[in-house]
Amino acid sequence: MLKNILQSSLFKITSLNSMSVLLKIGIGLVTSKLLAVFVGPSGIALVGNLRNFISSLEGISTLGFQNGIVKYVAENKDDNNQLKKIISTVFFSLLFVGFFLSGFLFFFADYWCFKILGNNDEYLIVFKALALALPWYSISIFLASVLNGKGRFKKVIWINSIGNVIGLILSLVLILQFRTLGALLSIVISPALLFFVTFYYINKEIPFWNSVRIRYFDFHFILKMASYSVMVLVSAVFGPLVFLAIRTNLIQSIGIEQAGFWETMMRISTYYLLFVSTILSVYFLPKLVESKNNLETKKVFWSFYKNIIPLFVVGVTLIYFARFFIVQLLFTDEFLPVTTLFFWQIVGDVLKVASLILGFQFFAKKLTVPFVLTELLSLTTLYFSSKYLITVFGVEGVVIAHALTYFVYLTVLVVYFRKSLF
């Protein structure tokens, strides 16, 4: 049995993915320490605002096509003519949207700077740099999605690993040189540089430039992808807006430092969630796409619950007991109040991870309306519960709201997918 486990594709991909995530976490240790020492809680709050804004832009600039690309490439990976249609159609669409958004960002940079980072004219260059970087970033996401759809999981993981190293080097140079401005610039520039890495790998897999021709453009394929666009754009636009609103409420209610503590907790959470989110994207999503009935879907669901969830629970339990050490290692003693946020954040993250595999079924089977309704339900629950709980528990109210939101979300998804689960 041990031999079968060690030779299974899930074990091999999970092991490589774990190494990639460990690399990213190791890099995160360095960048987090840099941010803590040179930027402080208030600067980290600004970094959080910019990350939310870029997440929203990412969804719009890619038209929410990522999961759709994975699905249709997976279904047509042996049909060269269909692949050319998919690649050409998406490439030219993203190129057009990318240049349009770049112009909008560049010429209205002062407006976006004020809305996202406040009255700080010194950060104007961040948005002009973002305008120039955006098209490269969106195309690199598209190319990685093509590789993912073709089942080249290892290449996708290598791309992520190389991207993390590039991000570290850039962060080191810019944060040491420009402090908060450097931190913001590194967030903007690093993803765009990933284009060159992704292009190298895609070109080894398929003759990319031979596959991109305007005559292959198929408008009907855009219509087929529309449901995926709606699903991703709902998350990409409304999700960051909710987090921006919560952070603004925290700043106005209890101060920018408290908002920085919450952003710090979110940063730590993001690191350990990478183990699950990456393996879901590169391994389980294509499996859900290929499953043809409830029985096959059930096998995918329970493979996740039996193999991934127990490991995750053990991992976050260890993280909880090591929370003081983690905060002091990653940040400074100034950030010790973050330790009070761990319990409810971890409870919420366990519920979140349990619901993620079910949520991916919406994308795998193009269940647009149920996805939009459940997503809006979770975002509404998070916003209003956090707004109320902040008045009662302060910054801890946000993480309690996080746990409550994913309890509600998981319950709804279990009821909806009960036939595939049981």
Image (tube, grey):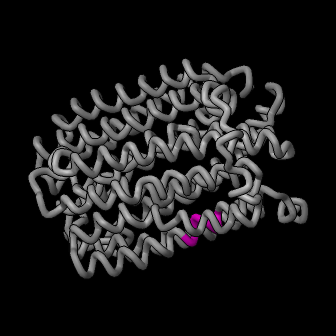
Left or right of 409? Residue 100 is: left
The vertical placement of 336 against 364, above or below, is: below
Look at the image and give the residue range highlighted in magenta.
157-162
- Which residue is at 52% across, 65% downward? 194
Q: Residue at image x 68%, y 22%?
A: 418
Q: Quadrant location of the C terminus?
A: top right
Residue name at image x 69 percent, y 61 percent: 202
Left or right position of 421 against 23: right
Q: Quadrant of the N terminus?
A: bottom right
Side of 225 where 272 appears, left or right: left
Q: Nearer the viewer, residue 316 or 145?
A: 145
* Vertical comparison of 33 with 272: above or below: below
Q: Name the residue located 68 percent from the left edge and 50 percent from the top edge.
A: 212
Q: Nearer the viewer, residue 261 or 234?
A: 234
Up/down of 250 relative to 170, above or below: above
**Foreground residue, 386 or 199?**
199
Tell me, yes or no, whether the highlighted magenta stretch contains residue 159.
yes
Q: Quadrant of residue 387?
A: top left
Residue 168 in sight in this render: yes
